[in-house]
Amino acid sequence: MRLKQTLAALLIVSTTHVGFIQTAQAAMVGTEAVAQASTARSANDARSQLNDAFARADVQARLQALGVDSRDARERVAALTDDEARRLAGEIDKAPAGGIIEVILFVFFVLLVTDILGFTKVFPFTRSIR
Amino acid sequence: MTAPPGRRRLLAAAGALALGGLAGCASLGATGTAALRSAPPAGLPRRVELGATPFHPQEDYQCGPAALAMALGAAGLATSPEQLARQIFPPGREGTLQIEMLTGARRNGALAIEIPGSLDAMVRETAAGHPVVVLLNLGLSWAPSWHYAVVIGYDLDDGAFLLRSGPLERQVLPFETFERSWARAGNWAFVVLPPGQLAATADEAKTTAALVAFEKTAPPLRAATAYRSALARWPASLTIAMGLGNSLYKASAQPEAEAVFQSAARRHNAAAAWNNLANLLLERGRLREARDAAQKAVALGGPTLDTAQDTLRQIEARLAASASPRRKAPRDRAARR
């Protein structure tokens, strides 16, 4: 009990302290924010990159082998929010040349899982658990 | 659990990040070697050996700390592998992640800049006097044996790289062998440099990423030194200019920071630069100039709009506060009309 109280007090002090520091410096824009802004791409660029990725012959072949229609993948890309599109395109960017097909498939399965979890509804063959 | 962990598992952690990229690499031919032999980079010596690079023989499986200590030593930031091991080689996980190699270099005061994954870059970098830390896969793609080593030179006539590697102070590795084991580890390499020096082969994006990461933990003046050298090479970079301004500001070198923000704001007409300039001017008590700059930042909008509006509010509050005592003075009022 004693420990909990002390911990709580400590947390309150430390968080208020952090809050204070942030207000004092909030008005400067940090270098990291500038760097991110300059490398950020538009959501449309990201989207077309994702579509290009799914249009690749080797990716289509793999999707087909898994019994998946590549049109499903395209529909899902269209349904992504701007932020999601940018993040997924970023994953593909980060993939080393040899591993890109794995990343694209990974993206596809992320979409599949979010469907099953009920966050999204794109693939007609998934049944949401919600 | 009971059997002594095999070498494969021991170093598996080191390459966990590279693993994703390994599929299909085993069939790669030594195309880089052929290119290097037929057309070596022009203007470079036939043979380079950075003999002054210190040697720390690797203990157990600690190739990461040993390699990093050698590279840091060559950059004039001497440290021991034991000291590094405590930072980047946590007990219980027998290997060093690639990202820990980079943060380990930064924590010891150096910039860690990733370089292109080509033999050409390797030759150029060592010829420029920079030892290169590489990740190699000494095993096979499906049975990896990860290993960090330091390339300290090359010999075009012998067709080999020279390395400090594991227990070997001077390993002569044929170009082909190096190329294959490096390719199986994703062609990953970086140089460790003191602030003020730049990699001979790194591009603007990789250098900028290294600088921004360095700024987070480095003393502000050292970060400023690093940014300044990069700005001389890429004068059109807004991020590098902002990094220099922010570092100088943190180092309380306000006149210098002001000059940097001024020129960045003019050159790029970027909201971030106008905003930071406004804050600096506010701190220096030049409220009207500060307000002009903050208004420009607000007008430009973008992701920094909230911050810029905040800045402008602060400046206007200060302007109002400094104007109110004057209201009582009739002479001042008359003069204003």
Image: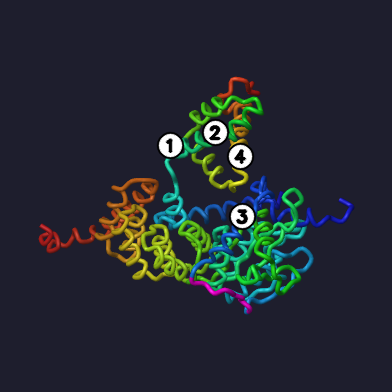
Label 4 belongs to which residue? A101
- The label shown at residue A11 is none
- On whether disc 1 and disc 2 are found on a single subunit, the reply is yes
**Please, what is the three-letter code of the amino acid marked with disc 2?**
Phe
State left or right for residue B337 relative to residue B50: left
Circle 2 Cα neighbour tier, 10 Å, few/some/many (<14 / 14–19 / ≥20): many
Label 2 belongs to which residue? A54
Q: Which chain carries label 4?
A: A
Q: How many numbered circles are shown?
A: 4
* Nearer to the camera, B213 or B153: B153
Label 3 belongs to which residue? A10
Circle 4 Cα neighbour tier, 10 Å, few/some/many (<14 / 14–19 / ≥20): many
Assign a secondary structure to mark 3.
helix
Q: Distance between the residues labelled 1 and 3?
A: 46 Å
Q: What stretch is highlighted in magenta?
A: B43-51
Q: Is residue B68 above or below residue A125?
A: below
**Please, what is the three-letter code of the amino acid marked with disc 4?**
Ile
Q: How far apart are marks 4 and 1 (CA)?
A: 22 Å
**Please, what is the three-letter code of the amino acid marked with disc 3?**
Leu
